[in-house]
C-alpha cells in the first residue's frame, strides 16, 4: 500500500483498482508509468492486475465458447506453472 504524507497507509476502493487495471490495459503505457501517474506503487498495481486476471480466469462460463476455451487453457497453464513451482520447492519430480 502507498503511504500518505502522514505515514498512514492509503486504501483504494475496488472501483479505483479496476479502473487502474483498465487504464494499464488500454493506455499502451508501462506498468511503471501508469503507477506513477496514479500515485500507487508499481508492485501494488501489478498485484491488482494479477488478481483481476486470475478472477477473470476463474469467472463463470463465457458466452463465446472460443473465449471460454482460451480462458480454460490459460487457467490450465497457470495451474501447471503453480504445480511445477511446488514440485521444485519440494524437490520431487513431476509424473504426468
Image: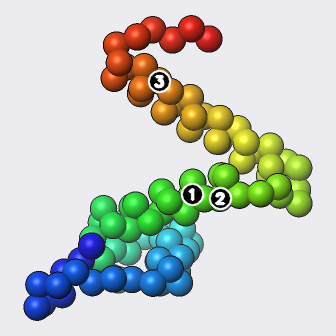
* Residue 36 shows up from this direction: no
Q: CA distance from mark 3 to mark 1?
A: 20 Å
Query: Percent position (x, y) of residue 40?
Result: 30, 77
Instruction: State which tag comes first along the sequence, 3 or 2.
Output: 2
* Residue 94, above or below 79: above
Q: Is residue 6 left or right of residue 40?
A: left
Query: Percent position (x, y) of residue 33?
Result: 33, 72
For disc 3, the marked residue is: 84
- Find out whether the residues at labels 3 and 1 contact each other: C-beta distance under 8 Å: no
For disc 2, the marked residue is: 56
Question: To which quarter of the image does residue 96 belong?
Answer: top right
Q: CA distance from mark 3 to mark 2?
A: 22 Å
* Residue 33, above or below 56: below
* Residue 89 shows up from this direction: yes
Q: Residue at x 57, y 34 (%)?
A: 79
Query: Percent position (x, y) of residue 34?
Result: 38, 75
Q: Which mark is residue 79?
A: none
Question: To which quarter of the image does residue 30 belong?
Answer: bottom left
**Helix, strand or loop for disc 1:** helix
For disc 1, the marked residue is: 53
Question: To which quarter of the image does residue 92 belong?
Answer: top left
Binning the other alpha carbons within 10 Å of mark 3 as few (below 14), some (14 to 19) or many (20 upward) gives some
* Residue 1, above or below 10: above
Instruction: State which tag comes first along the sequence, 3 or 1.
Output: 1
- Furthest toward the bottom, the residue is 6
Amino acid at each position: 500500500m502507498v503511504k500518505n504524507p502522514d505515514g498512514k497507509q492509503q486504501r483504494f476502493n475496488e472501483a479505483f483498482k479496476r479502473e487502474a487495471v483498465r487504464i494499464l490495459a488500454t493506455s499502451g503505457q508501462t506498468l511503471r508509468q501508469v503507477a506513477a501517474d496514479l500515485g500507487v506503487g508499481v508492485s501494488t498495481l501489478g498485484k491488482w492486475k494479477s488478481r483481476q486476471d486470475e478472477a477473470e480466469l476463474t469467472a463463470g462460463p463465457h458466452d463465446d465458447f472460443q473465449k471460454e476455451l482460451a480462458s480454460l487453457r490459460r487457467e490450465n497453464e497457470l495451474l501447471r506453472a503453480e504445480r511445477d513451482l511446488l514440485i521444485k520447492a519440494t524437490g520431487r519430480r513431476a509424473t504426468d
